[in-house]
Image (cartoon, helix red, strand yellow):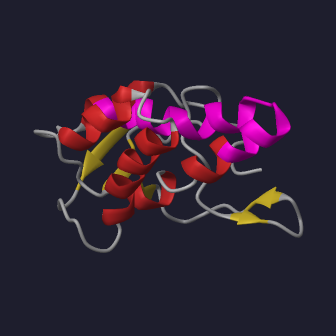
Amino acid sequence: VAFDGSDKNGMPHQTVNLSAKAITRSHRAQTNIAEVGTLQLEFRQLSSITNDPSYAQKTEHVFELLHPLHKNGLYPIDITKKFQSSDTDTNLESYKLSGKITFGAMGDSFYEYMLKMWLQSNKTETKYRDMYDE
């Protein structure tokens, strides 16, 4: 449900009501890198177990979307949708990173997942290690 309405270039929705299987509209137009960057390992494993690559593709694409937005290899923690005209406007240019750069709350898990994804791939998916090393 978190990825419903998001196309290949979209971020997952911030809040989901699991019992209603519905997106909960948030008053915030902003999320952070830890919120969108911490489901990859689980969804990759789910794809492996079910032989359905769609789970991994949706979550891995978050890293592809964020990679060009870094500043000197570091990522400010806040992700803001630039254009609020439409919930379906999810192209790459629609997002910007802002705020502080931190390895503490709201940022640390994003960096950890880069390294863990590289390890999970038996060190074959070097883009995640490269992102971590940048």
Residue at 54% across, 31% down: 90
Foreground residue, 117 or 22?
117
Whole-percent x, y for residue 119 in the image = 43, 44
Residue positioned 61% across, 26% down in the render: 8
Q: Relative to 122, is 33 on the left or the right?
A: left
Q: Quadrant of the C terminus?
A: top left
15 is higher (above) or lower (below) than 85 = below
Residue 106, given in percent of the width and then of the height, sits at 35, 68
Regarding residue 80, the answer to whether it shows in the image is no
Residue lying at the far right of the rendered structure: 20
**Residue in the picture at 54% in, 66% down:** 27
2 over 92 or under it: above or below = below
Residue 64 painted magenta: yes
**Residue 68 x %, y %:** 28, 28
The residues colored magenta run 45-67
Q: Nearer the viewer, residue 121 or 18?
A: 121
Most foreground residue, 73 or 115: 115
Which residue sits furthest bottom?
105
Number of disc labels: 0
Q: Main secondary structure of the magenta part?
A: helix
- Point 17% across, 62% down: residue: 100
Quarter residue 51 falls in? top right
In the picture as drawn, the residue positioned furthest to the left comes out as 72
